[in-house]
Amino acid sequence: MTPPDGSPDPWPAQWLRGVLDLAVLAVIARGQTYGYRIGNDLRELGVGTVKGGTLYPLLARLEETGAVSTTWREGESGPGRKWYEITPGGRDRLRQEGARWRTFARLTSDLTAAAAAAATSAPEPGAAPAPTRQSLDAGAQR
């Protein structure tokens, strides 16, 4: 999905900043993985491109807080890699923050849908107001 502004990422950066930790934890919860693959998975899942300068410090913070554990594995045909695995604490965080995010997303969706519906049904500027039940009843009594 290419956004209207033609940028390569489908979502505004400020949206990603709010949910990227959670998205990365969700990818790691699917099974042991390494940084480059996490970035590819996020892109393939539609989250967008997450640059290494953003991803690797985030992974370090997740490790520092105990949400993920790491192991170093030698590469089969290339350099070794740091592998990430979600910890029980990370699963708890994913479950709790995921529930809060889904509630927030649902509330935001409901709010913007209601505003969009109201905007499409709003009268043109200067147009006569739409009749109400009271105005119809008053007109019928004349």
Image (tube, rainbow, N blue to C red):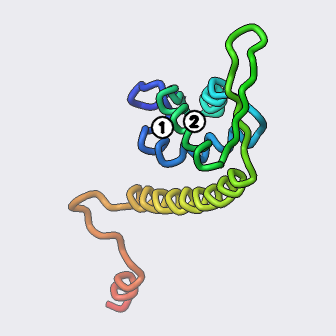
Report the Cα–Cα distance between label 1 and label 2. Answer: 7 Å
Residue occupying the far top of the picture: 77
Q: Name the residue under label 1.
A: 11
Q: In this view, does 92 lie above or below 17?
A: below
Q: Which amino acid lies under the numbered mark 1 shown in the image of this protein?
A: Trp
Q: Where is residue 41 in the image (x, y as percent from the top left)?
A: 66, 30
Residue occupying the far left of the picture: 126
Q: Is residue 122 above or below residue 33?
A: below
Q: Name the residue under label 2.
A: 47
Residue occupying the far bottom of the picture: 141
Specify the quadrant of the image occupied by residue 47: top right
Say which label, 1 or 2, has the lower sequence index: 1
Q: Do the residues labelled 1 and 2 touch (CB within 8 Å)?
A: yes
Instruction: Estimate how packed mark 2 is, as few (under 14), some (14 to 19) or many (20 or more) residues with alpha carbons within 10 Å.
Output: some
Q: In which quarter of the image is the N terminus?
A: top right
Q: Where is residue 133 in the image (x, y as percent from the top left)?
A: 42, 82
Q: Which amino acid lies under the numbered mark 2 shown in the image of this protein?
A: Val
Residue nearest the viewer, comparing 106 with 4: 106
- Kind of element beneath mark 1: loop
Residue at figure coordinates x 48%, y 48% from the top left: 18
Residue nearest the viewer, comparing 112 with 99: 99
Taking 56 as reference, is 81 left or right? right
Specify the quadrant of the image occupied by residue 97: bottom right
Q: In this view, does 141 lie above or below 23?
A: below
Residue at figure coordinates x 38%, y 78% from the top left: 132
